[in-house]
Image: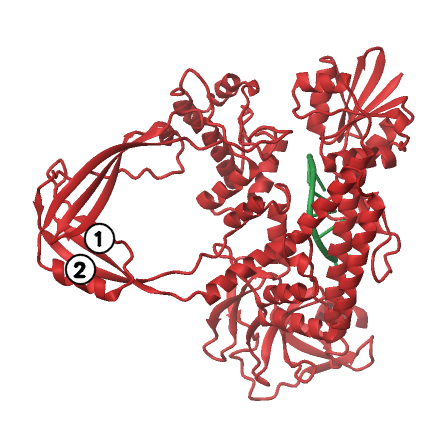
Chain colours: A red, B green
Amino acid sequence: MHEVIVCEKPTSAEKIAKALSPSAKKKVYNKKVKYWELKKDSKDITVVSAVGHLYSLTPDNPKDRVYFDLHWAPAYEVNKKGSGFTKDYVRAIKKLGKNADSYVHACDYDTEGTLIGYNALKYACGQDNLSKISRMKFSTLTKKDLLEAYDNRIDLDMNQVDTGIARHVLDYYFGVNISKALMKSVSSAKHRFLKLSAGRVQTPTLSILVERENEIKDFVPEPYWLIKALVEGRTEDGVEDHIEVDHVDGKIFDKARAEEIMTKCQGKDAKVHKISLSNSKTQPPVPFNLGGLQSEAYNVFGFSPKKTQVIAQNLYTSGYTSYPRTSSQKLPESLGFKEIFSQLSHDGEFKKHISQLPSKLRPNNGKKEDAAHPAIHPTGILPQGLSRDDKKIYDLIVYRFISVFFEAAKFETMSTTLDIEGEKFRFRRRRVTHKGWMEHYPYRNIDNEEFPDIKEGDILKVLKLLADEKETKPPARYNQASLIKELEKRELGTKATRADIIDKLYDRKYITGDKQIEVNQLGTNMIDTLSTYCNDLTSEELTRAFENKLEGIDNNTSTRSEVIEEGKKEVKIILGDITKNSKEIGTKLYESYQESNIVGTCPTCGGNLVKRYSFKTKASFVGCSNYPDCTTIYSIPKGTNFLKKKCEKCGLPIISFGKPRQRACLDPNCGKDTTKPHQPEKVGECPECGKQLLKRSGRYGDFIGCSGFPKCRFTCSVEELEQKLK
DNA sequence: GCAAGGTC
């Protein structure tokens, strides 16, 4: 008897194989794909693995105006970029999973996992005959759980499969079709291509950012006063120490009241009214889940969440750290802390900290859990030859892992109130009495202040009294780390996709800025447009509505085709509205896009110079917004940045380009003598349109161009022309 | 060209 077990990813395949039989043999297909062979209960078992989704939805007919008829096709054919690695896995499963007597679906027990395994069985193994398929249900990848799941296999839950399929189809219907309609509105209104997109997750995310912009725009600052005094004092060592004390009212919005305090206290001494000492603790941080690691790496190193995720994945595939796409903040004892620490101790720096660990190893676990994976931790294998950035992330993971086992840091706080003419002031100082974990986590500043040598009843001289006039501030813009946290809170997207979603918003030019994410006019207009024609898409409503509908499939109150039909109807209405208002929508979106690409003023006609991209030449260039009435055009090298600085001679922007970076005026002829009209040399006939070919000078030297430009875009190098003439 | 979701 031959049995094939299909798993979601190679690491879980290995764990499952070894759980079923410690003597499972590891094999490799086509030098790349690992699989396992074992014997159990007189069965020959082959354990193969997918790598996440191997199949993607794709339209039956790509030429359709709207995509409602979809089918599953190999991911490496559909998303050519980035899924190439799945090809070998599909081949391996096809070869190894053929004609078995029974099949076991052993992917993660959630909707996506169920669909991953179902599609692998159906399209790679050619099995959708449920009678041969059984399902393992496990929540951790421990030997005990896996054996139990194998021995008590259940039927494949087709409702769960249908829920997964419906989720994919609905996301496709709404996302792809509405994106297409928006792009079409631009091309029909302005005859320009603009890559636009909308979706169940990216659009509400953009909406969150737009809302924050609106809060900032609508914010009315209010003036207030902070009253402070500087009083003389000494530290316990007798060193002179000026103490800054604040009026207990804090923000004083009433100017008269602020003035009253100032006149009353002017020139008066302060009396120490009350001193109280208290102790406090700061617990160690919790183990990293992906969001936590991304947030910390952003705050400590300024790494984008995407960058951190890529590095964490590399560290994981190299075997140095554990699986990164986890939401767990817990480290189970079964990981074998002692063994990991003893291996890490081969590194001298780590050893200094590890040697001080308490004998009882109990991590300060956080609340968040994950069914499939523990919190991110080092495996114990010490890396060699990591790049600087990879090493930073690795060290961060190790030090966090170490620090969660230490005791709390302890502080002593001195809270003091002073009296100046009946007005109460106060100050607070905090000093460390026990560093605890903070000594072993080098990414936090320890604020250790000195206590002044004072006692109740002391009279202190006031050196200075001042009223600081301030304004209330609008809420801060999001940065990438705080946005990820907000998405987690609202349960938008998943841990594995949030960083990609944010990247996408940058890529579409909806947003700019790193430390403070700002929304471009295009982003604002997208939300404007979509909230007019499909309000659901801009809010979390669509995600919630999906969840409810999908839940219906899961518990048998509706069917997959009902849910899909309903979605189709809704999308059709939205598409109708967009088409009806296509000109207006397209114009608005394109013009707002141009706005964020304005780099200067056209010297010929006074219009805007706009950075644009040509699909024909696959290069960016700068053209006038009044094209075709004005044909001013500048070519720019690949990777050009526009600086804020303007050229002193002509006022055009200064650009930087090349490696090493060099700076120059946008106009390559700037500063050259152009008073004598330069007659370009005629060198022959254009092979494409028959007009004159001219020898022109460009940024990188001479080239041949057609006099019919820009209608004819024939161009070649001087050498190429010489070759042809020979 | 377009989504969101898995994964190397």
Chain letter of disc 1?
Answer: A
Is label 1 in a helix, a strand or a loop?
Answer: strand
Where residue A621 sits, quadrant-wise, is bottom right
Question: Are the residues flagged by discs 2 and 1 from a single subunit?
Answer: yes
Instruction: Please report contact status of discs 2 and 1: CB closer than 8 Å, yes or no.
Output: yes
Q: Amino acid at mark 2?
A: Ile
Residue A366 visible in image: yes
Where residue A725 sits, quadrant-wise, is bottom right
Q: Which mark is residue A222?
A: none
- State the residue position of label 1: A247
Task: Indicate whether A142 appears above or below A708.
Answer: above
Q: Amino acid at mark 1?
A: His
Report the side of A610 relative to A725 (left or right).
left
Seen at 74% across and 50% down, the residue is A171
Task: Indicate whether A650 appears above or below A183.
Answer: below
- On the image, the x and y values in percent for residue A528 come to 63, 66
Report the side of A529 relative to A241 (left or right).
right
Seen at 69% across and 55% down, the residue is A199
Q: Residues within 10 Å of mark 1 (few under 14, many from 20)?
A: many
Task: Indicate whether A590 appears above or below A337.
Answer: below
Marks 2 and 1, the one that precedes in the sequence: 1
For the C terminus of chain A, which image quadrant?
bottom right
Distance Cα–Cα, label 2 vs label 1 = 9 Å
Pick the front one: A48 or A555: A555
Report the side of A679 relative to A258 (left or right).
right
Report the side of A95 relative to A205 (left or right).
right
For the N terminus of chain A, which image quadrant?
top right
Where residue A523 sits, quadrant-wise, is bottom right
Q: Which mark is residue A261?
A: 2
- On the image, the x and y values in percent for residue A517 come to 52, 57
Pick the front one: A674 or A654: A654
- On the image, the x and y values in percent for residue A437 come to 38, 29
